[in-house]
Amino acid sequence: MVYDKIIEMICEQFGMEPDQLSENTTFTDDMGIDSVDVVELIVELETEFGLDEIPEEELKKMRTIGDLADYVRAHTDE
Protein backbone atom coordinates (compact mmCIF):
# COMPACT_ATOMS: atom_id res chain seq x y z
CA MET A 1 0.00 0.00 0.00
CA VAL A 2 2.66 2.55 1.05
CA TYR A 3 5.06 1.58 -1.73
CA ASP A 4 2.30 1.57 -4.36
CA LYS A 5 1.06 5.01 -3.28
CA ILE A 6 4.60 6.41 -3.39
CA ILE A 7 5.09 5.00 -6.90
CA GLU A 8 1.76 6.51 -7.97
CA MET A 9 2.74 9.91 -6.58
CA ILE A 10 6.18 9.82 -8.23
CA CYS A 11 4.67 8.88 -11.59
CA GLU A 12 2.14 11.68 -11.32
CA GLN A 13 4.63 14.32 -10.19
CA PHE A 14 7.53 13.43 -12.48
CA GLY A 15 5.79 11.92 -15.52
CA MET A 16 7.32 8.48 -15.09
CA GLU A 17 5.89 5.00 -15.64
CA PRO A 18 5.65 2.46 -12.78
CA ASP A 19 7.77 -0.06 -14.69
CA GLN A 20 10.65 2.44 -14.65
CA LEU A 21 10.75 2.37 -10.84
CA SER A 22 11.67 -0.08 -8.09
CA GLU A 23 12.56 0.05 -4.41
CA ASN A 24 16.22 0.41 -5.44
CA THR A 25 15.60 3.38 -7.76
CA THR A 26 17.60 6.38 -6.57
CA PHE A 27 16.12 9.84 -6.74
CA THR A 28 19.14 11.67 -8.15
CA ASP A 29 21.09 9.06 -10.11
CA ASP A 30 18.26 6.99 -11.60
CA MET A 31 15.40 9.48 -11.71
CA GLY A 32 17.51 12.59 -12.31
CA ILE A 33 15.59 14.78 -9.88
CA ASP A 34 17.21 17.34 -7.64
CA SER A 35 16.88 17.88 -3.91
CA VAL A 36 14.16 20.52 -4.36
CA ASP A 37 12.03 17.99 -6.26
CA VAL A 38 12.63 15.39 -3.54
CA VAL A 39 11.55 17.88 -0.86
CA GLU A 40 8.36 18.65 -2.82
CA LEU A 41 7.62 14.92 -3.00
CA ILE A 42 8.29 14.53 0.72
CA VAL A 43 5.90 17.38 1.58
CA GLU A 44 3.17 15.68 -0.47
CA LEU A 45 3.88 12.36 1.28
CA GLU A 46 3.75 13.99 4.70
CA THR A 47 0.28 15.28 3.85
CA GLU A 48 -0.90 12.05 2.21
CA PHE A 49 0.17 9.84 5.11
CA GLY A 50 -0.38 12.33 7.97
CA LEU A 51 3.28 12.41 8.92
CA ASP A 52 4.95 15.04 11.04
CA GLU A 53 7.64 16.97 9.23
CA ILE A 54 10.48 14.59 8.44
CA PRO A 55 13.69 15.79 10.14
CA GLU A 56 16.45 16.96 7.81
CA GLU A 57 18.87 14.29 9.09
CA GLU A 58 16.34 11.63 8.07
CA LEU A 59 15.84 13.22 4.66
CA LYS A 60 19.57 13.01 3.98
CA LYS A 61 19.42 9.22 4.49
CA MET A 62 16.69 8.75 1.88
CA ARG A 63 18.41 7.92 -1.37
CA THR A 64 15.96 5.39 -2.86
CA ILE A 65 12.24 4.86 -3.17
CA GLY A 66 12.65 1.92 -0.78
CA ASP A 67 14.28 4.16 1.84
CA LEU A 68 11.33 6.51 1.64
CA ALA A 69 8.77 3.69 1.79
CA ASP A 70 10.52 2.16 4.82
CA TYR A 71 10.44 5.49 6.64
CA VAL A 72 6.74 6.01 5.93
CA ARG A 73 5.89 2.45 7.05
CA ALA A 74 7.88 2.92 10.28
CA HIS A 75 6.07 6.18 11.12
CA THR A 76 2.48 5.31 10.18
CA ASP A 77 0.00 2.55 10.73
CA GLU A 78 0.11 1.67 7.02
Image: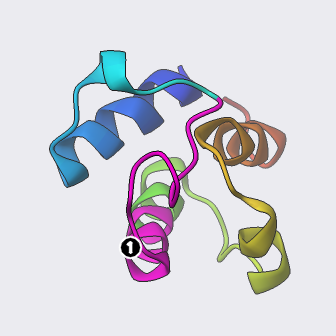
Q: Quadrant of the C terminus?
A: top right
**Percent position (x, y) of residue 1?**
53, 19
Q: Is residue 71 left or right of residue 16?
A: right
Type of amino acid at the residue the image marks with label 1: Glu
Q: Is residue 48 left or right of residue 24?
A: left
**Percent position (x, y) of residue 53?**
65, 77
Q: Residue at x 47, y 68 (%)?
A: 38
**Percent position (x, y) of residue 36?**
41, 82
Q: Residue at x 81, y 64 (%)?
A: 61
Q: Is residue 31 above or below residue 22?
A: below
**Residue matched to label 1:** 40
Please report the bounds of the magenta region as a residue range: 24-43
Question: Does the segment drawn in magenta span residue 32?
Answer: yes
Question: Does the segment drawn in magenta span residue 42?
Answer: yes
Q: Is residue 24 above or below residue 33?
A: above
Q: Is residue 72 above or below residue 33?
A: above
Outermost residue on the front side: it is 29
Q: Residue at x 31, y 32 (%)?
A: 8
Q: Is residue 52 left or right of residue 27?
A: right
Secondary structure beneath dot 1 equals helix
**Percent position (x, y) of residue 71?**
76, 48
Q: Nearer the viewer, residue 17 or 69?
A: 17
Q: Residue at x 35, y 24 (%)?
A: 20
Q: Nearer the viewer, residue 59 or 49?
A: 59
Q: Nearer the viewer, residue 53 or 64?
A: 64
| Among the 4 quarters of the image, the one containing residue 18 | top left
